[in-house]
Image (cartoon, grey):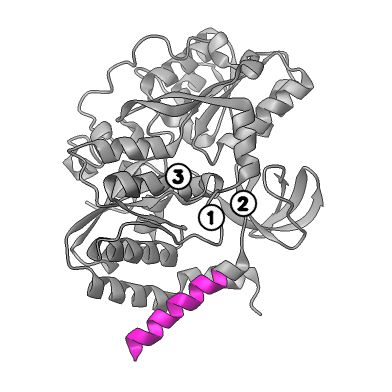
Amino acid sequence: MPDTPTVLRSFRDRKLVASLSDLIRRTSKREIRIMEICGGHTHAIHRFGLPDLLPPTIKLISGPGCPVCVTPASYIDGIIAACVEGGATIVTFGDLIRVPGSELSLESARARGGNIRIIYSPLDAVEIASKTDKETILLALGFETTAPAIAVAVKEAAQKGLDNFHIASALKLMPPAMTALAEMEDCRIDGFICPGHVSAIIGWEPYQPLVDRFGLACAVSGFEPLDIMESILGIVRQVEERKPCVFNQYDRVVTGRGNERALDTIHEVFSIGPGHWRGLGDIGESGLYLKERYSEFDASSVIPVRAGRPRQDISGCICPEILTGKADPSQCVLFSHKCRPDNPVGACMVSREGTCYIWHKYNIV
Amino acid sequence: MCLAIPGKILEIEQPYATVDIDGVKRRVHVGVIEEACVGEYVLVHAGFAISRINREEAELTIAEIEKIREVLRA
């Protein structure tokens, strides 16, 4: 019996990928637009060269599934103020450090003396805070995948009785954003490749309303080439046979109701409220906020993170349209010229899961 | 967005486990998944195990696609 790594490696079997490519070509007749929500899928699609294995009838569009890209400039501005003026230690996952606020990024704030630490796990932030009396702010960015880890960190800080640890929550929920996209007239989508690791937490059942209300084809996908090709085949079949459903392709990880222990942890610490999305605007019930019981750890009590309306995004940048699949990077005048990975103008060029970063890296234009 | 990598559980001391990720041993929090056992594979994201990996389901998926291949070659 093969061991797990051997089984997992077969999800990159070229012959099997070629067979799925062949079957997709035979099956796909109508022109369809499929949005892969997750930046991780966008990355895998182009890394494994999957567009070249698909017929011209299928157009893949990237969605708003990069937590860094959907974070408004005003969030960054508030954090930088807390860091440079307030002297707080900012603790963050690596990707966020280069996101441009209205004037500075965290990286340039660090160059001006701001104390910014990059971490792997939110528990590292609690560790840092417990060894100093300096104000320590964890930038809590991410979707349902990351939320349980942030929740555990808050509970640990409470257990340790830390009063110098706060989180600036910009945690977001994916299904409400997908519904907002489905409701947009000018954002014509025929199907979603649903985010695999968000679904490891929430399960595949939360996508059913997208099928029932909008008739959208859905496939919850893993991140290997075979996963993505099988998911695309599933969506093509649903569209051709006019039988939309939620196809759980990633069933080695995803179940119907998801990881209930992780969901309980999230709902113990956070309540749900409006979410502020760059490119999508405000979406009701799509943000996570600390509950009253843990409100002492809310950074907005320490810094005005959400002060005022979000500042206008950087002029010429069409990240908002790219995030909603209405445009692609080739339509942006800044792309690969003024806006490059070494000098990102828009957020989609900063994160490794940003559409523009991926298009630039894999030279897609 | 939510990069998560498979790793094998070597040792468990709740709520943590030692997990082998591509040859690197990491201390991973396993408190937000159902009881996992030594030798099992889990998905690790930001230092946390977010899910167990079901090997039987993985094998079934591969077997289904192999059937597709055989039908296409017939």
- Between A116 and A42, which is closer to the camera in this rendering? A42
Which residue in the structure is indicated by mark 3? A206
Kind of residue sitting beneath label 2 = Ser
Q: Name the residue rendered at 66%, 42% in the picture.
A: A261
Which percent across, then down, holds residue A47? 38, 58
Taking the image as shown, residue A147 lies to the left or right of residue A188, namely right
Q: Mark 1: give few (<14), some (14-19) or many (20+) Cα within 10 Å.
A: many
Q: Is residue A80 magenta?
A: no
Q: Name the residue rendered at 41%, 39% in the picture.
A: A175
- Asked whether the beta carbons under mark 1 and mark 2 sit within 8 Å of each other, the answer is yes
Which percent across, then down, holds residue A181? 29, 38
| Disc nearest the viewer among 1 and 3 | 3
- Between B46 and B54, which is closer to the camera in this rendering? B54
Q: Is residue B69 magenta?
A: yes
Q: Mark 2: give few (<14), some (14-19) or many (20+) Cα within 10 Å.
A: many
Q: Is residue A150 visible?
A: no
Q: Report the chain holding disc 3.
A: A
Q: What label does residue A254 carry, if any?
A: 1
Q: Is residue A144 visible?
A: yes
Q: What label does residue A213 carry, if any?
A: none
Outermost residue toward the bottom in this view: B74
Place residue A168 in its image quadrant. top right
Which percent across, then down, holds residue A41? 40, 52
Which residue in the structure is indicated by mark 2? B51
Q: Name the residue rendered at 29%, 68% in the picture.
A: A53
Prevailing secondary structure of the magenta residues: helix
In the image, residue B14 sits, relative to residue A362, either above or below, namely above
Q: Sequence-wise, which precedes: disc 1 or disc 3?
A: 3
The residues colored magenta run B58-74
Kind of residue sitting beneath label 3 = Pro
| Disc nearest the viewer among 2 and 3 | 3
